[in-house]
Image (spheres, grey):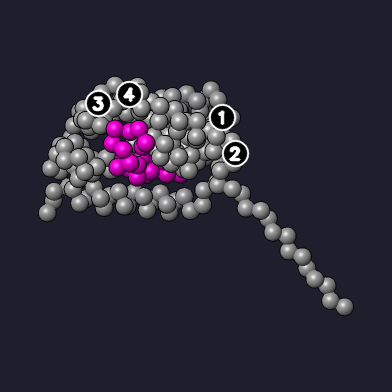
Amino acid sequence: MTSSTETTMMPRKPLLNTRQISVAAVLGGLSLITEAFGLSLPGYLPGVNFNLVGAYLSIATMAAGPLGGIIVTILDSFTSSVGFYGLPFYWPHVFFLALFYKRIYSMKSTAMKVVGYWVVTAVALFIQYWGWFFLYVYVFKFATTIWPLAVYNFVGVIPYATFLAIYAFIPGFVLVTAPNFVRPTWNFPYLKWVTAASIILSAIAVASQAGLR
């Protein structure tokens, strides 16, 4: 007598659930509206505006993972002053934040959560900036190399510090005051490798405009 063994297949956890998709869609819609109605302060270059898009994509990444942040960037691009050109240069930031966010969220100390969030966001924004330098040199021809933009933003401090506040202050406040809203229950496979790949590809693009040849 033979017996057959039934194998029960465990259902795969979806990358996003309905709530996470809704959160990303709402924040993406707010980002789209913000850009469409020009609800921003003018920046230091055409197409560079100080608005809340960074806050929206950060909160979406926290609550819905990298795909949430990506959804926001896609919706934002429909009305962004740089269009879809800037789309992939947000993604290293999204992936880097997502890579460390679960660790930040699990910290017991509120103060450490806030510090950790600001530090990770500062690094993610630093990485993102270089991709945008490439965009402004290669696509929009605002400079012949990336270095004048790098000096202005990082040595001059104010532009970088302003964007850091946009990307970190409101999301950090949400993390402390509404932790259940940004609880990282999302799933994203191979996040470490995707993050590394996005940073490497961005670095290759940036190096092509460094004017070192």
How far across and down, in percent of the image, does residue 149 sit?
19, 36
Mark 4 burial class by Cα count in 10 Å: few <14, some 14-19, many 20+: some
Q: CA distance from mark 4 to mark 3?
A: 12 Å
Name the residue type under label 4.
Answer: Gly
The answer for how far apart the CA atoms under marks 1 and 4 are is 28 Å
**Where, by quadrant of the figure, is residue 118 drawn?**
top left
Number of the front mark, 2 or 3: 2
Using the numbered discs, state the Cα–Cα distance from disc 2 to disc 4 in whole angstroms.
30 Å
Classify mark 4: helix, strand or loop.
loop
Asked if residue 52 can be seen in this view, the reply is no
Q: Name above or below for residue 7 compared with residue 19.
A: below
Which element is circle 2 on? helix
Q: Give the x, y percent position of residue 166.
A: 37, 26
Q: Pointer 3 and pointer 1: residues touching (CB < 8 Å)?
A: no
Which mark, residue 43? 3
Query: Please, which residue is most extreme toward the right here?
Result: 1
**What type is the residue that disc 1 sits on?**
Phe
Nearest to viewer (mark 3 / mark 1):
3
Circle 4 is placed at which residue position?
Answer: 38
From this viewpoint, which residue is outermost toward the bottom? 1
Residue 98 lies within the magenta run: yes
Image quarter where the N terminus lies is: bottom right
